[in-house]
Image (cartoon, rainbow, N blue to C red):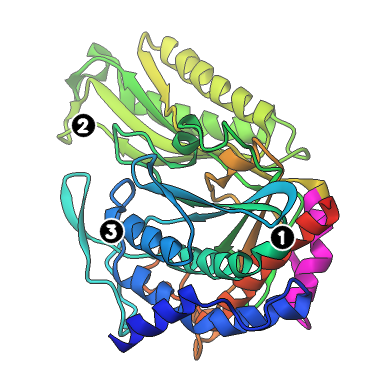
Amino acid sequence: MRNALIAASLLTTSLVHADLSPQGIDDAAAAVQPQVVEWRRWFHQNPELSNREFETSKRLAEILRGMGLEPQTGIAHTGLVAIIEGGKPGPLVAIRADIDGLPVTEETGLPFASTAKGEYQGNEVGVMHACGHDAHMAMALGAAKILNDMKAELAGSVMLVFQPAEEGPPAGETGGASLMLEEGIWDEQEPEAVFGIHVGIVPEFGTFSVKPGPLMAASDRWWLTVHGKQTHGARPWGGIDPIVLTSQIIMAYQTIASRQVDVTKAPSIISVGRIQGGVRNNVIPDSVELEGTVRTFDIEMRDYILEAMERTAQGIAQTAGASVEFKVADNNNPPLINDHELTEMMMPVLNRVTGEKAVARVTPQTVAEDFSEFSNRVPGLYLFLGSLPEGTAPEDWSSNHSPKFDINEDDMQLGVRAFAHMVTEYLQQAD
């Protein structure tokens, strides 16, 4: 009860002597840090899977209403949006945080570790915030608290976007950033810029990592079925062997990335993650199924590679009289590209936030993020915040999606400050 009263007091009382100066924002971030930690721990202990974030959404709405905001709920199933209306005219900018957990059973040993269960692909699984979305929500809320308390001085407004299903909606469902946009969150008023922060990803601990241009890859999930003709293993000439053809296709796929596209322009990766075919040692099966992903940073290269994969598979299959079916998922993430001008505008701001630890310039990361749906529509800036749990050696760090993934909660104050500083810097420059 005492913690609840403290939380309520923090939400309903403006920060003392709050002002939009850099020092004023930093003082406000320090003041709200205990609440940010409390929020993060609640979200960490109560994770929910994609499109199932009902209690998470309810808790976010309660917190935002406690700040005096009026969140719109039920967007893209469980997402929500709230607007901080500045006291002075100016543009709209957005802060985005993702809210879903992963089908991972937690092994951190934290006193607030998750014991939640959920259903994933028909099975009961443990659920964990193994990718830091608990911290993302808490940092966005901390920045919202600061900006809302200072809204009379804001020359513009701030949209808070809490997005479900970043890890991907369940099979057969829609969700995530693309569905929020389809449902019109930016139809009436589109922000001029959108900001996001992700903990982990790259181990530049205690500071931000960023680069202008391509930062994270497009991720295209694909399936291939090779149809042959079943026969006895002792008489392969009596059928069409889809296993041999599949092996040829897999090897040929690697030459697409290495020989058919300009490797100096952008990297690309074709991965096969699943092969399934046959049930017995002496039976050549009718068909083989493959599943994998393609990672790219350039839209034209992405389109060419996917077309080349289908063409290559068909050509190899035809040499033996076989056939193929090639399919690409229709809810894949485009590449995440940081706006050059926005990135360079914010570099002095971010270096001021990190102080002695300068912001690191990072190479493109081949993981994917559907923040790209937002940043493909308006200029966006996405940051990595490296965070090493206290008492952990760098070589023992457990990366995102690990059952032992954790952060140093002190680093969340960097995220809160970065969000608040980037928003105010943009609005002041636009004023």
Q: What residue type is labelled 3?
A: Glu
Query: Going 39% across and 58% down the picture, which residue do you hit?
Result: 61
Q: Does the magenta stretch include residue 115?
A: no
Judging by the rendered image, the residue that carries numbered circle 2 is: 278
The numbered mark, 3 or 2, whose residue comes first in the sequence reads: 3
Residue 155 visible, this angle: yes
Q: Does the magenta stretch include residue 354?
A: yes
Q: Distance between the residues labelled 1 and 2?
A: 65 Å
Q: In terms of secondary structure, where does tag 1 sit?
A: loop
Q: In terms of secondary structure, where does tag 2 sit?
A: loop
Residue 141 image point, x, y percent? 51, 66
Residue 164 image point, x, y percent? 40, 48
Q: What residue type is labelled 1?
A: Leu
Foreground tag (1 vs 3): 1
Judging by the rendered image, the residue that carries numbered circle 1 is: 154
The numbered mark, 1 or 2, whose residue comes first in the sequence reads: 1
Q: Give the range drawn in magenta.
A: 342-361
Query: Going 54% across and 25% down the picture, which residue do you hit?
Result: 306
Residue 353 image point, x, y percent? 74, 75
Q: Where on the picture, by quarter, is residue 302?
A: top right
In the rendered view, tell whether residue 298 sits above or below residue 345. above
- Is residue 393 or residue 410 the one in the foreground? 410
- Is residue 284 or residue 398 the one in the foreground? 398
Foreground tag (1 vs 2): 1
Residue 422 visible, this angle: no
**Magenta stretch mostly in which secondary structure?**
helix
Query: Going 54% across and 80% down the picture, which residue do you hit?
Result: 32
Contact between marks 1 and 2 (CB within 8 A): the answer is no
In the rendered view, tell whether residue 359 sits above or below residue 48. below
Q: In terms of secondary structure, where does tag 3 sit?
A: helix
Q: What residue type is labelled 2?
A: Gly
Judging by the rendered image, the residue that carries numbered circle 3 is: 55
